[in-house]
Amino acid sequence: MQIYFSDYTVGAGVATAMANSSPAIRLRTSETLGDPAALARFLAEHAVESADTRRITRRDLAQVHALREEVRAALAAPTEREAVERANTLVQRAGRGPLLVPDADGWRWVVGTAPEASVADELAVLTGAGLLGSLHALGHDRFRDCAAPECAGVFVDTSRAGRRRYCSPQICGNRHNVAQHRARRKRNSPDGP
C-alpha cells in the first residue's frame, strides 16, 4: 500500500471512522466492527486496498480493535507534541519511506507499507500519515471532541472552513438538530412547558 502525503484527509477520515466505531463512543449503537465481514466492509467503504487483497480473519479483527484505541489516543491527545508522537508511532509500525514516486502531475511523496504488513499495520500507517498531514496542514486545534451530548467521539476537522462540530454530521449532528427542533416546538406550542 502507498499513502500519499498530500491526501492526508483520506487517512484522517479513516482515523476518525475507526476511532468512533467502538460501542463505547455512541451510547446507542453496538460494535461497528463486530466480525471479520464488518471489518472487510469498513475497509471497502473507505477504499483501503486491504479489503480487496486479503481474507480478513478474527486475528486481524482483534488487532484492529487494539489499533482503534491507539488511533483514538492520538486524536484525543491533549497537546500537539503528544499527537505527533502518537501518529509517528503509528506510521513506524510498518511504514517504509518516504519515497518520491512519479504520477501524472510529476512527482509525489508517499509512505509505503512493508509487503508482509498486517491489515492493522496498514491501517496504522494510513491513519498515522493522515493525522501527521492534518497536524502539519491544519494544526492541532482541528482535533476535536464531538459536540453531541450523547457522544464521546473524536474527529479531525478537515473541512475548509474548520467549523465542524460533530464526529459524524449525519448521525450526531442530525440527532442534535432534531432534539433542538423538538425542544423549540415544545417551548412554542400552546400547551408549552
Image (cartoon, rainbow, N blue to C red):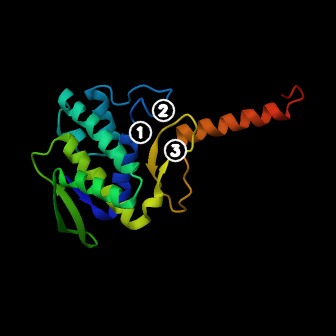
Image position of 44 (left or right of 27): left
Residue at 29% x, 33% y is 39
* For the residues bearing labels 3 and 1, Cβ distance under 8 angstroms: yes
- Please state the horizontal and vertical placement of residue 147, each as a whole percent of the image: 56, 44
C-alpha separation, residue under disc 1 versus residue under disc 2? 8 Å
C-alpha separation, residue under disc 3 versus residue under disc 1? 10 Å
In the rendered view, tell whether residue 48 sits above or below residue 141.
above
Image position of 143 (left or right of 55): right
Query: Along the line of sight, which residue is nearer the eye, 18 or 146?
Result: 146
Look at label 3 and name its amino acid: Cys
- Please state the horizontal and vertical placement of residue 35, each as a whole percent of the image: 29, 25
Residue beneath disc 2: 26
Query: What is the secondary structure assignment of the residue under circle 2?
Result: loop
Residue beneath disc 3: 146
- Crowding at dot 1, Cα within 10 Å, few <14 / some 14-19 / many 20+, comes out as many
Closer to the chain start, of discs 3 and 2, is 2
C-alpha separation, residue under disc 3 versus residue under disc 2? 10 Å
Residue at 70% x, 38% y is 180
Residue at 37% x, 66% y is 136
Query: In the figure, residue 18 lies in which quadrant?
Result: top left
